Amino acid sequence: LPTVNERGEQLDGRESIKETHASWDLDMQRMRGAKDEPLHPSFNIIFSMPAKTDPDKMLDAVQAFARERFQGHQYVMAIHTHETDPADAPPEHPHVHLILRAEDEDGRRIHIRKTDLRNWREGFASQLRARGIEANATSRAERGRSLKSVRGAEWHIQQRYEKGLRSGSNPEPPKAKVARFLEASLE
């Protein structure tokens, strides 16, 4: 996959990516916050656009956004398109995975809040528009979508359950799905 770091350098192959990630010294970061809660050493951020969005322009927009917003932080990003995504059934839309080291070069941590996410969406949309891609930073509610998508872990649990059904075994249904069903039936 086309992978680049915060300096715009192309990383070739898994070994190069592993070396870059290892150079971040994540084990040297402060791993507990003021309330003794565990802190994330890095964050995984996904930038996504609808199918048929130009992936080169999208990657360029993400790089410009990251240079502006994550100055002093180390990061690695890779773009997935329908053609390059290693999944069995890859999505049609291009998306960029960005792994961001939580501490910058001076040891200051980034703390991501909901307002930050909103500002990031607006900044990303602005970068896309600057490259001729029509984009708006609308919230889920503004788009008329009140339900969130299924989280990754829950999706994988559901896939295993459905695979078990297809194979003829009698698997236990996912607990989260059962709980939602029971909650809805009591209303």
Image (spheres, grey):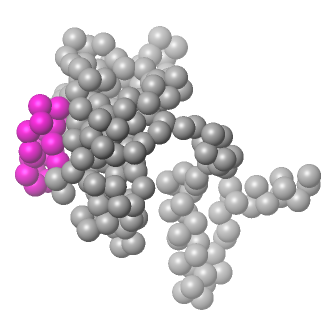
Q: Residue at 56% across / 79% down in the picture?
A: 164
| Residue 103 in picture, x, y percent from top left | 29, 21
Is residue 80 or residue 128 the one in the foreground?
Answer: 128
Is residue 142 or residue 104 the one in the foreground?
Answer: 142
Q: Residue at 42% across / 20% down in the picture?
A: 111
Seen in the image, is 21 located left or right of residue 125?
Answer: left
| Residue 153 in picture, x, y percent from top left | 51, 54
| Residue 182 in picture, x, y percent from top left | 83, 58
Q: Residue 21, relative to residue 94: is it above or below? A: above
Residue 150 image-quadrant placement: bottom right
Is residue 61 or residue 175 the one in the foreground?
Answer: 61
Q: Residue at 61% across / 81% down in the picture?
A: 165
Residue 8 image-quadrant placement: top left
- Point out the image quarter for the N terminus: bottom left
| Residue 151 in picture, x, y percent from top left | 54, 51
Numbered circles on residues, count = 0
Magenta residues, start to end:
3-22
Q: Residue 142, relative to residue 73: is it above or below? A: below
Residue 29 appears anywhere in the view:
no
Seen in the image, is 22 located left or right of residue 57?
Answer: left
Tell me, yes or no, whether the highlighted magenta stretch contains residue 178. Answer: no
Q: Residue 133, relative to residue 171: is it above or below? A: above
Q: Residue at 34% across / 55% down in the picture?
A: 53
Q: Residue furthest bottom?
A: 168
